[in-house]
Amino acid sequence: MKVEVAIAELRKSRVALPHPFGFVPTMGYLHEGHLSLVRRARNECPSVGVSIFVNPTQFSENEDLSAYPRDLDRDLRLLEAEGVDLVWTPTSEDMYPEAYQTWVAVEQLSQPLEGLHRPGHFRGVTTVVAKLFNAIQPDKAYFGQKDAQQAVVIQRMTEDLNFPLEVVVCPTVREPDGLAMSSRNTYLDPKQREAATVLYRSLSTAVQSFEAGERDAEVLRSRMSEVLATELLARPQYVSVADPFTLEELDGPVERALFSMAVHMGKTRLIDNMVVGD
């Protein structure tokens, strides 16, 4: 496994690897969710690369950039055990040199949901992902369904900018009690960790209601909110029933929907989602 920092060296190592080349972009502090993406890439591609970069431009001033968990040595051991061929660990100076001023923005899809509560977040995401794609030139790029809006935004960017690659969205990986795996779960104390399962339970309630025949968007939102209200430690920021492709909030009867939410547990902000319908 080669580990590169400089873009010039990355490109030299990348060009020697066979196609199709699978790519998993990460911010490190890897967990089973990340590794499931690596395994999917490994199963589908003869060569696999991973980036580890905590991207400062997708964090707002009041978010946890400085506290974001990091353990590069551990990450590299995990990736080597999974048979990864190439790891790129750029620095902030590499990605955003002095006088940097070019940004990529997906206008409409970045506005609702996470975009409404985290202004500028997706501009940072799409800019860094575009730079990663440009540098490492993947044939397939793998993302998790847990960040549902991010996946939709990146798919749109990839199509709009004619990147010659396929975006593969993989199922959310969960703990045995249903909590979606996330690097931020490490911030939770034991009581918050136990309470955090309310996200999974509220989403599951909405899915069960939908499968039982309930189609009214407001009723489905209410079912999720009712379950969240049973957990005193949970402070919901939003609860959504949206179109899974346009991300527009839905009213009245729905045939397909993205159920999603953001919930604060203490200082930790958790997100989760499930999709129903065709």
Image: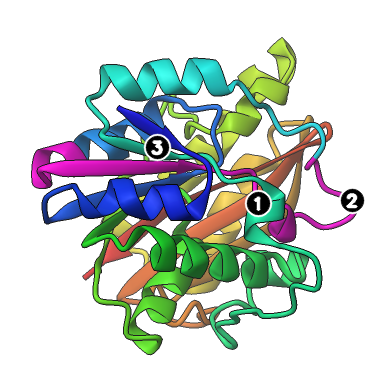
Q: Residue at x 30, y 76 (%)?
A: 255
Q: Position of residue 174 (x, y in %)?
A: 40, 30
Foreground mark, 3 or 1, reads 3
Which image quarter is the N terminus in? top left
Q: Earlier in the sequence, mark 3 or mark 1?
A: 1
Which portion, as a residue range, is magenta?
41-65
Please report the residue visible at 60 percent of the width from the left and 21 percent of the height from the top: 71
Tell me the CA gap for discs 3 and 1.
16 Å
- Residue at image mark 2: 62
User: Which residue is identified by label 1?
Assistant: 55
- Residue 41: quadrant of the picture: top left
Residue 58 within the magenta-colored segment of the rendering: yes
Q: Is residue 14 left or right of residue 271?
A: left
Pointer 3 residue = 87
Q: Earlier in the sequence, mark 3 or mark 2?
A: 2
- Specify few, some or many for label 1: CA neighbours under 10 Å numbering under 14, 14-19, or 20 or more: many
